[in-house]
Image (cartoon, rainbow, N blue to C red):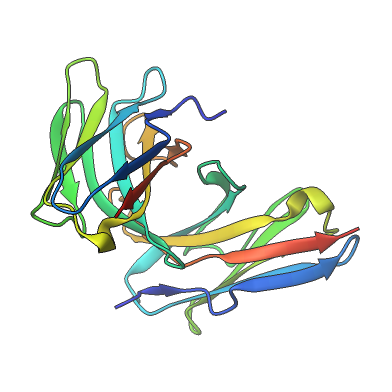
Amino acid sequence: DQQVKQNSPSLSVQEGRISILNCDYTNSMFDYFLWYKKYPAEGPTFLISISSIKDKNEDGRFTVFLNKSAKHLSLHIVPSQPGDSAVYFCAASAGYNFNKFYFGSGTKLNVKP
Amino acid sequence: DSGVTQTPKHLITATGQRVTLRCSPRSGDLSVYWYQQSLDQGLQFLIQYYNGEERAKGNILERFSAQQFPDLHSELNLSSLELGDSALYFCASSVSGLETQYFGPGTRLLVL
């Protein structure tokens, strides 16, 4: 049973436009969420996080939005750059406990020049 | 470069065999995590060690085991391998387990 779902396996966006990657979760106990980026032949790298006490967290071109009532989070990348082309994973955990993360299956973003 | 190293990068073996995957965490990190990523699947948390002791268990099969040594490197042992064990196995480390994790490049296991 997947507790974190990324329903779009791929997304293609033009350079300079906004990329919106979505993630849904089912466990209402989740209260900490992260996004990771993964390039081919490399491990995932941490991108941005948000705790449930916030509904938005911004870091440069990356913004994560959390809608707790909908159990939905999204990652916005503005403006998108070709170097952003990668697989993006969302992850969630319950409590301030990073022992067990639940990951989505990833969305492959392609930013076209 | 995350500072986490994993060996080997690739491993091809046959069903029924046993393999050992190795992970060296970032300098100073006490926690090591193991994840499995099967085709088109997300990362599945397998197990966590903290300073040599098992801290948390996820969806780890009984055929799989892990340990963390005094020098903090970790090994994941996979035995009685099945075709379905073919996957990318990632190791990650963090300072105390309460922060974000840094992932190694992964070991790609192919069971034929």
- Quadrant location of residue A4? bottom left
User: Quick one: B46 or A54, which is closer to the camera?
Assistant: B46
User: Quick one: A111 or B88, which is closer to the camera?
Assistant: B88
Question: Can residue A98 be seen in this snapshot?
Answer: no
Outermost residue toward the bottom? A70
Q: In the rendered view, would you say A25 is above or below B9?
A: below
In this rendering, would A55 be left or right of A62?
A: left
Residue at (52%, 30%) from the top-left corner? B2
In this rendering, would B62 be left or right of A51?
A: left
In this rendering, would A31 be left or right of A57?
A: left
Q: How many labels does the image show?
A: 0
For the C terminus of chain B, give its image quadrant: bottom left
Across and down, in percent, residue B94 comes to 38, 33
User: Quick one: B68 or B61, which is closer to the camera?
Assistant: B61
Residue at (55%, 45%) from the top-left corner? A46
Across and down, in percent, residue B41 comes to 42, 66
Residue at (71%, 72%) from the top-left corner? A11
Q: In the rendered view, would you say B55 is above or below B8?
A: below
- Quadrant location of residue A73? bottom right
- Quadrant location of residue B10? top left
Across and down, in percent, residue B64 comes to 14, 48
For the N terminus of chain B, give its image quadrant: top right
